[in-house]
Image (cartoon, rainbow, N blue to C red):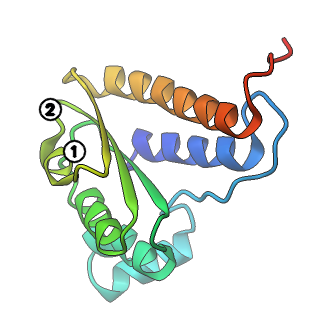
Amino acid sequence: GNGASGALAQYMAALLVGGMERERPELPALALGTDVATFTAAARRGEFADAFAAQLRALGQPGDVLVVLSSNGRAANLVRAAEAAQEREMVVIGLTGAGGGELGRLLRDTDVHVCVPHERPTRVHECHQLVLHVLCDNLDQQLLGDEEIAT
């Protein structure tokens, strides 16, 4: 993601690596673009819109999952990242808003699209954070079962 969506991507990576509410082994996750040296080197080889895609071409493996967050689905760098992930036979989970934009249109039947039906980015980001919590909680449930969470 870009901007606030990028911050949410970092937050999700932290939840996957560090856990949410239950103890579990770390899961491999990273937020693209957070390493400035790697990000700018990837952008320097082409253009900014290809920086995330370059990282995916270097790191992505078939069966990996790319979670793309965009308040409107129109950012060229996010669309190109999703295309690069699809070329590497990765699953793409697109969290969008405002109709989904080009990102929503390029997702395949094997991908997942959650589009928040709102135009305001702030409302979309709030809903995206909730969706990230649900995804991480469901992942923990799949890995650990239905045990109660200590409060």
User: Is 24 placed left or right of 127 in the picture?
Assistant: right
Say which label, 1 or 2, has the lower sequence index.
1
- Image location of residue 65, percent across then percent down: 47, 57
**Residue closest to the far top:** 151
Vertical comparison of 89 with 112: above or below: below
Residue indicated by mark 2 = 99
User: Is 89 placed left or right of 135 in the picture?
Assistant: left
Q: Which amino acid does label 2 sit on?
A: Gly
Judge the density around disc 2: few (<14), some (14-19), many (≥20) Cα neighbours within 10 Å. some
- Image location of residue 150, percent across then percent down: 86, 16
Query: In terms of depth relative to the viewer, which is nearer, 141 or 15?
Result: 141
Question: What's the residue at 16%, 54% (across, down)?
Answer: 106
Query: In terms of depth relative to the viewer, which is nearer, 149 or 122?
Result: 149
Count of numbered marks: 2
Question: What's the residue at 19%, 44% (across, down)?
Answer: 104
User: Is 77 placed left or right of 61 in the picture?
Assistant: left
Q: Which amino acid does label 1 sit on?
A: Gly
- Image location of residue 33, percent across then percent down: 48, 63
Residue indicated by mark 1 = 73
Circle 1 sits in a helix, a strand or a loop, which is it?
Answer: loop
Instruction: Give the quarter of the image for residue 23.
Output: top right
Q: Do the residues labelled 1 and 2 touch (CB within 8 Å)?
A: yes
Between the residue at mark 1 and the residue at mark 2, the CA separation in whole angstroms equals 8 Å
Circle 2 sits in a helix, a strand or a loop, which is it?
Answer: loop
Instruction: Give the quarter of the image for residue 121.
Output: top left
Vertical comparison of 26 with 70: above or below: below
Question: What's the residue at 67%, 30% (across, down)?
Answer: 141
Judge the density around disc 1: few (<14), some (14-19), many (≥20) Cα neighbours within 10 Å. many
Vertical comparison of 74 with 57: above or below: above
Question: What's the residue at 42%, 29% (across, down)?
Answer: 128
